[in-house]
Image: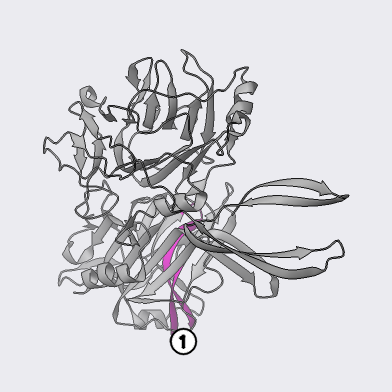
Amino acid sequence: MPSGAETHVVEGSPYTETDVIPMAGGVHTLWVEAKDDRGRWGPSADFTFFVALPTGPTGRWHFDDGVPDSGTTVAKDTATEGTRHDATLHTAGAGWSTMARRGEADRSLWLDSAAPAEQSAYAATSEPAVSTKDSFTLSTWVYLTDASTSRTVLSTPGGQAQAFALYYSGADRRWAFSHAVDDSAAPALVTSEAEGTDPTLNVWTHLAAVFDTHRDTDTADDTIQLYVNGRPQGTPVKLAASAASQNATYQPWTATGGLQFGRSVIRSEGGQYFRGLIDETAVWQRSLLSDEIRQEARVAQDDAPANELVARWDATTATGTEIAQGTPYPVPAMKLSATGAVLDDAGNGLTLDGTSGYAAAQGPVVDESGSFTVSARVRLNGQAMAEKPDGYRGQVAGQSSGGESSWALWVVKWADGLYTWEFTRTATDAAGEVTRSASVSPASELAETDTWVDVTGVFDAQEAWTQTDPLDPAQTEQGMGKLQLYIGMFPVESGSNAGFDAVQQGGGELGIGRGTAGGTTGHYFPGDLQQLRVWVGAMTANQVLHQVVPAATP
C-alpha cells in the first residue's frame, strides 16, 4: 500500500514518487509502465523481489493460565520474539474469568470485584515489554463494566510520567491513547481519541494503539493512532506539532517501568484502575499496518476467527412468562408479551401469533462496530403467513435503535407462497433518519413453512467489499464490514447490498417476534422459536456448520 508520496520536477515535468509497502512477506512482483507527457504508455517491466516475513509480537498474554479461585497469580508471555515478560496479578481483586474472547474453555484477566477494598487490582510485568522510544503497537480485548471514572487498560511508567496509556477517559467519555512528550512531573500529553463517545458497557471491544517513528530519526513525523474494532479513529496525530501547540517540546524517551494491565502509574502512584475483563493482549516492537490490526481483531484460532457465545435464550426449557438467559454474561431474561406469546409445555419452544406476541430483553449484548453472529432456530407458520399482505415483513429477532433495528433477522412475504429470510443492518443519525442500510436475502431460495430451520446472520467488521452501482457500472464504492446470511448450513449469495461500513450501535429493546422499522414498532413474526443465540466474532461457514446447526438440532 502507498505509505508516502513526494512530488519532484525533472526538466520542467512534475512526477510523484510513491513508497509502496507490501502487505505480506514472501515473493512479490511489481509491474511498472512508463507514460510520456502525451499520455502514451510504453512497454511494461516487472521486478520480482523477496520481502522478509514481518516480525511477530514481542509479548502476548492469553490470560488462560488459571481458573477462577485457583490461586494462580502469573500470566505467561507466550510470544516467541525477544525476551519473555510474564505478568503477575496483584491484590485479591485480580483473578480469572471463564468469560473470555476465544470461546469455550478460554479464560481472561478478571478485574471486577464488587468489594470496594478489592477494586485496586491489576497485573504487571517486572520490566518494560517494549521500548517506548521506538515504534510499537498495542492490541487487546476489553470488557468494560464501569464507566463512572477513567479506566486504564495498558500503560508503561517512567520515573514520573507514563510513556503511554491506553484507557477509557471518564471526562471525555471515550476510548483514548495518550503519549507523554517527556518524563517530567507534569508533561504535555498528546492524545488520539475515539470518534464516538459513551462506549457500550458489558460487551467485548478490541482496542489497538500504534506509536510510529516512520523508521527514521526525524521526530517531526512521529505519530500515534488509536484503533477501535479494527477501525482507525481519525487520522494519525503528530506528536511534535501537538506538543508545540501546548508550548512543549516532544522528544522520544524510554520508560523503565513494567507493562501495567489495568492501572495507570504516575509518580509511582497507581490509579485509574480498570473494572471488567482484559484478554488477548499483545505488543509489537514495530508499527503494525492497518490490515495487520484488522487481522489481529479477528482473533485467529486454528486458522479461523474465534467466537464467544455471549447470550443464549432457550425457549424449549422455559416455562411461565420469561425465557432465561443461559450464559455467564450479565444479560437479562426475555420477558413475554401479555398476549400472543406462549411457551409450549411440550418443549417445542415459544409460539408467536404474528399479531401481538413477542419476547424482549434490554440490549445490546455485543459491540456492533465489531464482528458478531446471531442465530435463531425458527418455524414459520404457513397459515398465518398466508393471511399477511404482500410485502409484509416479520422480524424474527433484532436489536432496536431509535426508529429502526440496528440488526435484524426477518421473513419477507413477496407474494402468496413466496417468502424469504433476510438479515439486515441499519444506521441512523441523531434525528432518527436512515443514513446507511445493508441486507442479504436469497435471490431464489424460498423460506419453507412449518419446518424448523436455523437462520444465521453474520456481520464481519473486518471484511472488505466493493459494490458497483447496477445502473452505472462505472460507479463503485469500497468499505469494510459485510453481512452474510446462512439458512441451515448453507450460505446465501451476498449480492450487491451486503456492505455496511457505518458505525452503528443499537440500544434498548432486543426482541424476539417483533421489531422496529420506519419509525414504527410491530412487524410481528408468525411462528415458533426454539432458541436465539448471539456470539461476538464473525463465524465462517465451517463454524456455522459445526457450532450452530448441530447444537440447534432437537
Q: Is residue 461 visible?
A: yes
What main secondary structure does the magenta stretch of the protein show? strand
Rendered position, 13 above or below 254: below
Q: Say few, some or many: other residues with alpha carbon within 10 Å of mark 1 (under 14 / 14 to 19 / 20 or more).
A: few
Magenta-drawn segment: 401-423
Q: Where residue 88 appears, x then y in whole percent?
A: 22, 31
Whether residue 348 sits left or right of residue 474 in the image: it is: left
Judging depth in this view, the residue of 46 and 519 nearest the camera is: 46
Q: Is residue 369 visible?
A: no
Residue at (58% x, 31% y) in the render: 217
Can you tell which quarter of the image residue 108 is in?
top left
Please tell me how many numbered marks the rendered image carries: 1
Residue at the farthest bottom position: 417
Residue at (83% x, 49% y) in the render: 10
Residue at (36% x, 57% y) in the render: 537
Residue 541 belongs to magenta span? no
Judging depth in this view, the residue of 250 and 516 nearest the camera is: 250
Residue at (14% x, 36% y) in the render: 72
Q: Where residue 12 appears, x then y in whole percent?
A: 88, 49
Residue ID for mark 1? 416
Q: Quadrant of the C terminus?
A: bottom left
Element under label 1? loop
Rendered position, 404 above or below 178: below
Q: Quadrant of the N terminus?
A: bottom right
Q: Where residue 76 appears, x then y in whole percent?
A: 23, 40
Judging depth in this view, the residue of 283 and 149 nearest the camera is: 283
Residue 411 belongs to magenta span? yes
